[in-house]
Image: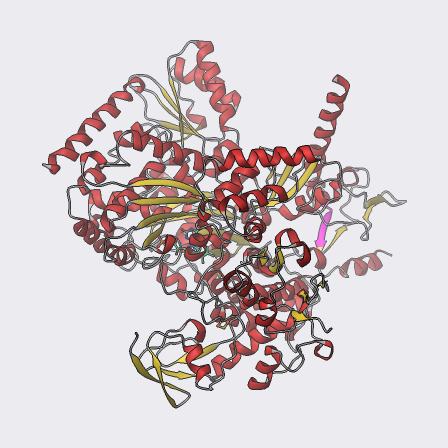
């Protein structure tokens, strides 16, 4: 545990080297920290506040304000259901409900095994395929409840194969 | 003298660019649209397929990645230019078609006309986009180059006269440049339509200190993506516009504020900035003149409200994206307290064109009050979704039925939602109003972000109002009482109505709240958030009343007010498709073979309705749900 | 120094410095305008509570007094149908997320919400809206005071006191929209934060959200 804290600090220090000590660098720094670590650990936020000379609570404010930032580690696979206007009209909510039901998590949560996190996103820009789901970086179009089962099944199968190979 | 200096520099640069592109002459060139939309539809796979196929067959042809042409319904989309043929555009390309095109067209000179969508240049053989119904109305100003030039190679833009406006401008007095922009009456394309020239003038007159130029690319409307498209397809035109603006107002530093989600746009803009710097179009003494200016990308962190100017500035300064009271306007006190020009991506895009062709040319298109073109994202129940650019003043009817090719599947038009979450829903009788800033505002909608969603008879207006309000409610920054709490209460009322738990008194409260949030909110997010509710209340009050009084959703959309039912006289009894389609095992078989739905288990996912073979079409929706019991009683 | 100008508020002639914010001019001249979020020293007013609406002759919609600079010859009305309507709605909206149990509240009698209700003849209950339930979370970890988030109206005066007067930086706003709230870093208890218990934030609180413990 102690060791992990150390690595977080080191990463953050490394990132901070590229920035001047100015408050206006807060968002770029936080973004880079998250890119590196996948989320914003408490220790990292403290480090950033210290380096930029601003109260920790201000960093926390920004980290909780923006959609981009997350305070807990993401799942191994990210399922993003498009809730743009076109997808909503074509049944995006139905797709989202299906994932919630199958994964037994609510939107914004990660499955207990850390495998999947489920999120909503605004228009991903392929409205003609609506409703659209982005699994990791792969776009799935015309997602019906049947397709939801299909997507999850293909992961399951992939994982089993992986295990057999190991 | 300066005059010859920048011009000479430009002429040399253009010659070099044309020379760099020589390798594409005299051989076939395949342009693959790799905007985010194209990529989502598999454009990269298609690009690779072409490359493989060309190598396999040993053909010398260029494969160029270009941006998006706006025909989203036809992605992945490619253009093949082969000497001796008009450039031809093919849509919905797959690996099979790739093989055929290489074999038949590139090797054997048969362009496979049966698969082509349109030609790009007028010719005797094949129709062009101009000959399409939409071509009659479309007029491409800022989208002209999108989909034709490689956004990752500055040479393409320069070879098409890119940056020539800048070279000219650097020989003019800044005041002259400003005069031209003012004369053009260019109005901001970010939503409110404020004249750009007037904003620039305030900044220009604000002394000689530090000034900034910022491009607003925070496009947050959940259904619009034209700014992303432009940044991805033709970043240099935006950059050129910003440099010209900086010259006119005397700024030395600028930022492009781009949504973090737009990773491809950010990458391409950064790449474009690097190339522009290498060619001395940015940085110290641009093109050999005395003018210095540089640009950087600031990527937003995902908050719709950051599109609002003061919130955008706050977030750039390292705070939460919280709007502030105006005045002072940004032009007086913006980034780091200095005078700042903030304009939309599209607004900057027009600037090089206006400088190159003149204010009078610009004013020839559009209406006197709103000159130029308007860019819309067509979505929803429309046959030809995508990006379109039409002259201001085009009517909604032309836009939807001619340009967008109407409503698919012979459904009836119900309404059009325009301007995204800040806009409004307009009914059939509003279809003939011309699209410009002032007419739309009069009708209760807004040009807004340019999102345009067509709704047909199957769409529930209360549900739509709820969708948009849900969005603004979630995106409210939470600082001011009306927006934080007002939108929340409005949403709760709407939710109750769509669940069949509303009453007429709460409808009155909804209207009062909507009006008060509109007048009382601090920033334009709150001031415009009630528009979808107010317009639907005005034009579709009967639907609200049906939900409240009849507990019925006339469009059969609101999940709590509908039930699924299998019509006994239509069900084949022998087929089991619906049973298998149900994700929650709610469908069972009765003793007589008839299928039926267990309403307690049903999650209303529509799967069985889609699965039931069209020859039976036995699954129907009814509203209110009580009708099912009535039908069942009839059966007995 | 700014020049003196004469303005008229509710028919009363008042002399004020040009550019000063209307809210403070009115209050100093014993004209009451409801307000929660305004802090006089703040250069750019928060203008978040939306209670200080007044009408100015020549403008079509009511404006917030805390942001309105005084200009020569300005004619102001603090009570018009339009103003009263906005204030009534804003007040009811604030009450809908305020845990209403004045009897048990330490600020009973000195609460700014009670004062607004009294001055404007508004009821301290909801008639159009349903209460938005807020979890009762009381942080009584500091020795001398406690924070009851269920009573907080998010005016931000405590944050101003903490950051700008005390210069500590223990509390601030976090999250967005309906989830916006006053918290410490990482939602810790106040006792785990840099808080020095100077008490300035408690004094700044217009309602019973921050209150001194009884000894
Ligand atoms: C909630 C909200 C969101 C906005 N989002 C955007 C946006 O995404 N892009 C944009 O250019 N303008 C947006 N605007 C408008 C900007 O505040 C500003 O008016 C605009 O960028 C000015 O540029 P223009 O004059 O070129 O339109 C938004 C305004 C509000 C209130
Ligand atoms: S005191 Fe003016 S808005 Fe709060």
- B422 drawn magenta: no
In the rendered image, residue B339, in percent from the top left (x then y), is placed at 31, 55
Q: Residue furthest right?
A: B591
Q: Main secondary structure of the magenta part?
A: strand
In the rendered image, residue C112, in percent from the top left (x then y), is placed at 59, 78
* Residue pictured at 32% horizontal, 49% vertical: B212
Quarter of the figure with residue C182: bottom right
Comparing A143 with C55, the one in front is C55
Q: Residue furthest left?
A: B1
C135 vs B93: above or below: below
* Residue pictured at 55% horizontal, 85% vertical: C120
Q: Is residue C98 visible?
A: no
- Quarter of the image with the N terminus of chain B in it: top left
In the rendered image, residue B235, in percent from the top left (x then y), is placed at 36, 37
Q: Is residue B408 left or right of residue C9?
A: right
* Residue pictured at 49% horizontal, 50% vertical: B220
Query: Which residues are drawn in magenta?
Result: B617-621
Q: How many marks?
A: 0
Q: Is residue B22 visible?
A: yes
Comparing A105 with B565, the one in front is A105
- Quarter of the image with the C terminus of chain B in it: bottom right
Q: Is residue B273 left or right of residue B74?
A: left
Comparing C43 with C162, the one in front is C162
Quarter of the figure with residue B505: bottom right
Quarter of the figure with residue B11: top left
In the rendered image, residue B475, in percent from the top left (x then y), is placed at 55, 55
**Colour scheme employed for the rendering of this structure:** secondary structure
């Amino acid at each position: 545990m102690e060791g992990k804290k150390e690595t977080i600090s080191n990463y953050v220090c490394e990132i901070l080297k590229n920035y001047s000590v100015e408050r206006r660098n807060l968002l770029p720094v936080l973004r880079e920290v998250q890119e590196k670590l996948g989320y914003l650990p408490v220790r990292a936020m403290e480090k950033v506040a210290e380096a930029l000379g601003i109260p920790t609570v201000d960093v926390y404010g920004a980290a909780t304000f923006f959609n981009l930032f997350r305070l807990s580690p993401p799942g191994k696979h990210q399922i993003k259901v498009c809730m743009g206007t076109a997808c909503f009209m074509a049944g995006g909510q139905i797709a989202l409900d299906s994932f919630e039901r199958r994964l037994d998590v609510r939107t914004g949560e990660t499955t207990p095994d850390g495998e999947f996190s489920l999120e909503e996103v605004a228009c991903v820009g392929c409205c003609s395929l609506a409703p659209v789901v982005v699994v990791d970086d792969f776009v799935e179009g015309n997602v019906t409840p049947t397709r939801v089962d299909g997507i999850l099944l293909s992961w399951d199968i992939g994982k089993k194969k992986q295990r057999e190979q190991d | 003298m300066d005059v010859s200096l920048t011009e000479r520099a430009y002429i040399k640069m253009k010659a070099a660019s044309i020379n760099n592109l020589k390798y594409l002459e005299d051989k076939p060139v395949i342009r693959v649209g790799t905007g985010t939309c194209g990529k989502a539809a598999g454009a990269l796979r298609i690009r690779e397929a072409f490359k493989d196929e060309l190598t396999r067959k040993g053909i010398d042809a260029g494969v160029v990645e270009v941006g998006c042409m706006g025909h989203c319904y036809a992605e992945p989309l490619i253009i093949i230019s082969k000497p001796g043929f008009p450039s031809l555009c093919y849509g919905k390309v797959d690996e099979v078609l790739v093989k055929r095109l290489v074999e038949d067209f590139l090797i054997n000179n048969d362009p496979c006309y049966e698969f082509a969508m349109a030609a790009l240049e007028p010719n005797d053989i094949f129709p062009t986009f101009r000959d399409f119904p939409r071509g009659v109305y479309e007029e491409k100003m800022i989208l002209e180059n999108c989909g034709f030039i490689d956004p990752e190679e500055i040479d393409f833009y320069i070879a098409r006269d890119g940056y020539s406006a800048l070279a000219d401008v650097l020989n003019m007095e800044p005041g002259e440049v400003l005069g031209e922009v003012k004369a053009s009456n260019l109005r901001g394309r970010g939503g409110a339509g404020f004249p750009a020239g007037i904003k620039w003038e305030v900044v220009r007159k604000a002394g000689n200190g530090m000034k900034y130029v910022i491009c607003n690319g925070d496009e947050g409307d959940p259904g619009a993506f034209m700014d992303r498209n432009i940044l991805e397809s033709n970043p240099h035109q935006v950059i050129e516009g910003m440099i010209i603006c900086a010259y006119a107002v005397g700024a030395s530093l600028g930022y492009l504020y781009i949504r973090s989600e737009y990773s491809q746009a950010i990458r391409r803009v950064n790449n474009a900035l690097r190339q522009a710097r290498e060619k001395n179009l940015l940085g110290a003494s641009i093109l050999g003149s005395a003018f210095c200016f540089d640009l950087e990308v600031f990527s937003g962190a995902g908050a719709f409200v950051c599109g609002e100017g003061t919130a955008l500035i706050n977030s750039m300064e390292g705070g939460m994206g919280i709007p502030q009271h105006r005045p002072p306007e940004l032009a007086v006190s913006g980034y780091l307290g200095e005078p700042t020009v903030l304009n939309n991506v599209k607004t900057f895009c027009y600037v090089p064109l206006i400088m190159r062709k003149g204010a009078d040319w610009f004013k020839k298109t559009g209406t006197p009050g709103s000159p130029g073109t308007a860019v819309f994202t067509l979505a929803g129940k429309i046959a030809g979704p995508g990006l379109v650019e039409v002259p201001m003043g085009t009517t909604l009817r032309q836009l939807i039925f001619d340009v967008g090719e109407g409503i698919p599947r012979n459904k009836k038009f119900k309404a059009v939602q325009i301007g995204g979450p800040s806009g409004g829903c307009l009914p059939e009788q509003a279809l003939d109003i011309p699209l410009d800033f002032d007419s739309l505002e009069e009708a209760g909608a807004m040009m807004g972000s340019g999102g345009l969603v067509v709704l047909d008879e199957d769409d529930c207006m209360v549900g739509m109002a709820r969708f948009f309000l849900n969005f603004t409610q979630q995106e409210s920054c939470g600082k001011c009482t009306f927006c934080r709490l007002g939108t929340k209460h409005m949403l709760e009322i709407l939710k109750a109505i769509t669940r069949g738990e509303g009453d007429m008194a709460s409808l009155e409260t909804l209207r009062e709240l909507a009006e008060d949030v509109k007048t009382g909110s601090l920033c334009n997010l709150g001031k415009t958030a009630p528009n979808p509710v107010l317009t639907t209340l005005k034009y579709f009050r009967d639907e609200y009343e049906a939900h409240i009084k009849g507990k019925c959703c006339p469009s059969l959309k609101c999940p709590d007010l509908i039930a699924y039912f299998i019509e006994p006289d239509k069900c084949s009894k022998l087929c089991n498709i619906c049973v298998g389609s149900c994700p929650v095992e709610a469908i069972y078989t009765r003793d007589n073979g008839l299928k039926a739905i267990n309403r307690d288990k049903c999650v209303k996912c529509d799967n069985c309705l889609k699965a039931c073979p069209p020859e039976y079409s036995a699954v129907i929706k009814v509203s209110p749900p009580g009708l099912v019991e009535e039908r069942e009683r009839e059966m007995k | 120094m700014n020049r003196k100008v004469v303005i008229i508020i509710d028919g009363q002639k008042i002399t004020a410095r040009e550019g000063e914010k209307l809210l403070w001019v009115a209050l100093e001249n014993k004209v009451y305008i409801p307000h929660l979020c305004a802090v006089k020293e703040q250069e750019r007013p928060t203008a978040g509570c939306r209670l200080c609406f007044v009408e100015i002759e020549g403008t079509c919609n009511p404006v917030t007094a805390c942001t309105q600079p005084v200009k020569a010859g300005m004619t102001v009305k603090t009570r018009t149908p339009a103003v009263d309507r906005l204030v009534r709605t804003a007040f009811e909206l604030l009450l809908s997320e305020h845990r209403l149990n004045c009897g048990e509240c330490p600020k009973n009698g000195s609460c700014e919400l009670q004062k607004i209700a009294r001055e404007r003849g508004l009821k301290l209950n909801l008639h159009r809206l349903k209460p938005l339930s807020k979890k009762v979370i009381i942080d009584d970890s500091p020795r001398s005071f406690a924070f009851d988030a269920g009573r907080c109206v998010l005016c931000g005066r405590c944050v101003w006191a903490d950051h700008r007067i005390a210069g500590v930086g223990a509390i601030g706003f976090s999250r967005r929209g309906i989830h916006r709230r006053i918290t410490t870093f990482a939602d810790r208890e106040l006792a785990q934060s840099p808080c020095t218990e100077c008490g300035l934030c408690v004094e700044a609180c217009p309602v019973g959200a921050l209150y001194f413990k009884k000894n």
